[in-house]
Image: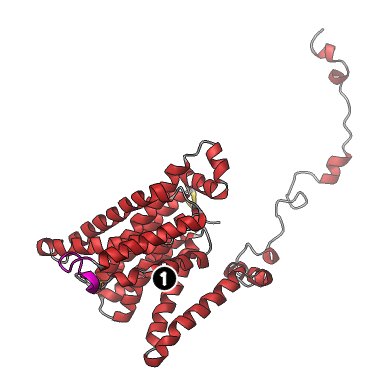
Amino acid sequence: MLKLGNAKLKHYINYIAIAIVTLVFGGISLSGSLPFSTINLLEKIAISIILATSLSMVVGFLGELSLGHAGFMCLGAYIGGKASCLLEPVFGNSIVSLIISLIVGGTVAAVFGIIIGLPALRLKGDYLAIVTLAFGEIVRTVFMNSSSESFGGSLGLSTPRYDKKYLFIIAFVLVIICLAVIQNFIRSKHGRAITSIRDNEIAARATGINVTKYKLSVFTISSLFAGIAGVLYSYSNYRVQSVNFDYNYSIEILVMVVLGGMGSINGAIIAATLITYLDTTLQTVLTGNLAVLQDLFYALILIILVIYNNAPSLKTFRTTHNLKSILNKFSKHDPSHRRDDEAKWDRVPTKIEMNEVLSVDIQPTSSTLNPDKKEGK
């Protein structure tokens, strides 16, 4: 495996892929040749990747089931959107206003993550899922019933739309930052403590790991990036409506994590991209009377993908026909193309032949026979 310094290349492959996508589409966008539909799709993909990778910390690495991710996103969208409305008369629709809104929205979501996480993380399994689901519905209902002067009520909050040529570039830069924080955290000693909690919480607690601290840290970081994704959502749309952050959206984010593989950051990125592209394409293709079939096709495709990834009878097919096995056929790591060991004893040139070494007769010397004589005794 190629290495960059002391780190393996595979640890940086997702950064490289996202950077290439950002540079290619960013250059096309700055030249004015990128269609608005593609720009809108790239914004959605970036937001989905941030949501999926941040939720993967809780579900995949910590092993807890959370269904309130859309609630934290809703907090970031409304609070960050309100901040952008207040900052627009001062800074205009500029990058300064965007950065401040991102900080405000992400911080508020992280604070609520701490507030909810302290009591909720004492629960496990279905009980934690119910509590986080209830939190998401409470947040959505509060913003829905707010006054029109504060957060727009049922009509939603009108927010400034950032320049479409640059927003998706900023969003993908935030994706790289999100990946850097999450992956470095997971690969550190703290990440090993988190995975030990997932594997056996009793054993982890017995070894001295502060389970509550690590659970709360993961929940807070996950909430922070969900809030940042919400702020990006508010800047990519002219209006933020609470109806878009219901429990179905939380389940959709959870599907991205599960479909990509539990505890797999790269899998979450790929699944988020595919599901977002699929959802957007079905909305475009199935129009008019066929729009009622969108959820049906979407559900069928997800069922097929889940069965393919998890069915025991397809394990052999998945092993022999996956991307890794295909790439190995063209690489030096393929066993069928492996060369013989050039360092074998019969291939290494020596000064004398091995049969000569074996035929040498070793005659004992006088010093060997009389050690006293050698020492002068």
- Give the residue at x 50% y 39%: 209
The amino acid beneath tag 1 is Asn
Quarter holding the N terminus?
A: bottom right
Main secondary structure found in the magenta portion: loop
Q: Mark 1 points at which residue?
A: 248
Quarter holding the C terminus?
A: top right
Count of numbered circles in the view: 1
Dot 1 falls on a residue whose secondary structure is: helix
Q: Start and end of the magenta stretch?
A: 146-158
Q: Is residue 48 visible?
A: yes
- Give the residue at x 67% y 68%: 312
| Horizontal and vertical percent position of residue 327 | 58, 69
Q: Can residue 238 be seen in this view?
A: no
- Give the residue at x 25% y 79%: 32
- Give the residue at x 35% y 58%: 225
Q: In this view, does 143 lie above or below 25?
A: above
| Horizontal and vertical percent position of residue 37 | 32, 81
| Horizontal and vertical percent position of residue 125 | 51, 56
In this picture, residue 375 sits left or right of residue 29: right
| Horizontal and vertical percent position of residue 76 | 28, 61
Q: Is residue 295 above or below residue 367?
A: below
Is 156 part of what is drawn in magenta? yes
Q: How crowded is mark 1: few (under 14 residues within 10 Å), some or many (20 or more)?
A: few
